[in-house]
Structures are given as structure tokens and as C-alpha cells.
Image: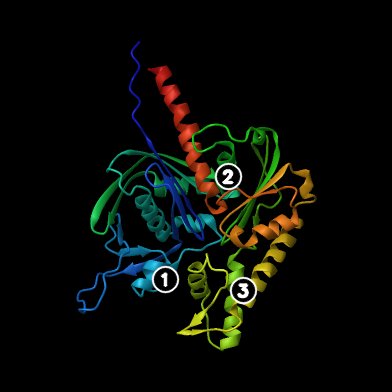
Amino acid sequence: MTKKNVVPVYVVAMDPGNGGNKITSDFVKRAYTEAVLGRYEKPTTKSRMSRQSEGMSYRVEQDPQLWVAGYKAIQENKLDPIPLHSRNSLSRYSQPMFAVYAKIGLAKALEGAPDMIPILLITSTPANDFHNENVRNQLSKVLNDLHKVEVNGERKVINVVQYEPMSETEAILYDLYFDENGNVADEKIMDEDILVINAGYGTTDLSRYSNMEYIKMPKETLLTSFLDVYKRCASWLASTLQKPIDVQDVALQLEAQRDKQTKTFKYVNDVVPGFNDIYNQAVKGVFADLLSELNGIIDDPDLFARIVVVGGPIEEWGDLFREWNNKRVQIPEDPQFAPVRGMYKFGKFFVLPNQNEAASAKG
């Protein structure tokens, strides 16, 4: 019997969260865009000293509106930011703006790729949402099939032939299990009782896995998140300056200072004194709230073989998590990208090989 040729399928993994969209694919190893969009209009006239913005503009499907994504592009073009934060996942995934945000992410993931190549797309949700059929159906409705996105006026046709939603906490286990080449890197995961904590900018999500099997916990979404740090800073600024301060303004300025030890906040053009101390107090105070909420769910963290902690806020909270339980806490390299790396590995080293093997057997 002649075996059929297996058509190559390319993998795209995205984690379109409240803080931003983390992306990895067969074409783009690592990309990130904050969860904020801006409505853009091309300038009709320019002064002789004006400079061309280096950012990208996007038009999604049949919508005539042009968009830019991320704080830098919004600042460069002096646009009003439209944040995409929400603690209600089904409502968030049902919003037209989420579709725009996600499809811009798809275009970023396929920079340099030809049109119409078959794509296996994997995205993640909190574990509790992943087990909600309505959530999975809504995501499939938005992300499966053909998509048309214009990037700086050039149309790109994206052919998602297979869509796989997965739990972001399960994805983290795949990141630890496989190395970059698809070899087994950590086989112990298969036999352990593990708590996974994904600290985010909208929620903090927990999941328990025993022998890689998901075990539902009494509560899996903590309302405390790093967004509360921004809120505390905004409240202090409003009280100090006696002016209304938008949380998004605080988020915008702090996002641009992730690699800086000392944080500042500018109101108009003036640096507000004392802000760094307030920021550090907020980081520790919100973490204490998160720990209080966590301890109300977990009787004894030492009952777990390990506690894997990931997410963007781990840049600030990593040492505090280790102080809480240095014996059990494990923080992967580049913890913000652990879920999306795990999704990519799941698709590349688990889904596709199994499908190709089944197709070859049938052929």
C-alpha cells in the first residue's frame, strides 16, 4: 500500500491575556504586544520636520478601521489607549475588540510566512475556562478558519486549519516536560502532584495536576492580581496630585520601565517625587493579599511535590514566592513566556507527530 504524503502544518501558539499577547511560532520565536489598541488614521499632511512612525498599522477582516497595537505605537501616534482587560473570560472573548487583538497577534506570529499555509493554532485560557464548553466554542468561532489582516496596507491571508484551545496551566507542564528539540527534559512531572500558579495582570490562576491529570480545586481564580498594584499607585497619585489619574496611564508608564530598577511617574512633564517607594509598597502589599487568598485555598503547600509559578509579574514577585516556600517553588526560565512555549511544544511535539503517525498508518 502506498503511503500518502503528509502535508506540512505550521504551528502558532498565542497567549492573548489581560496583560498582553505572548506569541511563538515556526516563524517568530518570541513576540509580545500589550493588551491595548489604538484607533489610527493616516496623517493627510505632514510638516517638513515630522517623522514617520516606525510602528505597524492593521486592518482586520472587512473592518475599515485601522489599528495600532501596544503602548509604544499608541504613544508615538498620540492616540487614546483602548485597554482589553476583563475578569469575565466568556464576555471578553465575545467582544469584537478581542477578535481584533487576537488576529493582529496571528499576523505578528506569521511575519515572513507565505499566505495560505496550513496553520495549527493553539491558544490558552485559565483551566476553569478551558473546561467550559461555551468558552471553547466561542474561541473556536473567533479563531478557526480563514482570516484576512492588512499589515501596513499589505493583505495577509491566514489559514487556520486546526484550532486547539488548552489550559494555560497545563501548557506550563508541557514547557517543563519537553526541551527545545522535543526530547523529554523532566519526566518526573508524569508522576508528581503539582500546583501551578499563573500570576497575571487581570487574575491569578491556580491548577492542580496529579500524574498530569487535572484535579479541580475549590477555587481556581484569585481576584488579586498585579493590576491591583497599578490601582494602588493610581489611588496614591490621585490623592497626592489632587487630580484624577487613570489606572491605564499608570500601567502605560510602568510597562515602559520593566527593565528599570527605579520606577517613576510623570504628570504632564514633571516627575512625581516618592513614587518609587509607593510602587514598592504596593508590590509587597498586593502580594501579601494574594498570599492571604492563596493560603485560604491551600491547607499545606508542602503536600505538593512542586509549586510551579509563572507569569509576567514574577519579575517583581519571584523572590517573594521563594520566601513563601523556597523548598517547593519552581520558577521556569523566562516565566512570562512559559505558557506560550508550552503550547508551542504541545503542538509541535505532541499533536502533529501523533496526527502524522495516524495519517501514515491509514495511508
Sequence-earlier tag: 3 or 1 = 1
**Of labels 2 and 3, the one closer to you:** 3
- Contact between marks 3 and 1 (CB within 8 A): the answer is no
Question: Gap between marks 2 and 3, in whole Å?
Answer: 29 Å
- Given the image, on which type of amino acid does mark 1 rest? Pro
**Of labels 2 and 1, the one closer to you:** 2
Question: Gap between marks 2 and 1, in whole Å?
Answer: 31 Å
Q: Residue beneath label 2, please? A: 172
Sequence-earlier tag: 2 or 3 = 2
In which quadrant of the rendered view does residue 8 lie? top left
> On the rendered structure, is 159 left or right of 141?
left
Q: Is residue 165 visible?
A: no
Q: Residue beneath label 3, please? A: 279
In which quadrant of the rendered view does residue 185 lie? top right
> On the rendered structure, is 183 left or right of 13?
right
Which one is in front, 70 or 180? Answer: 180
Sequence-earlier tag: 2 or 1 = 1
Quick one: SS at disc 3?
Answer: helix
- Given the image, on which type of amino acid does mark 3 rest? Tyr
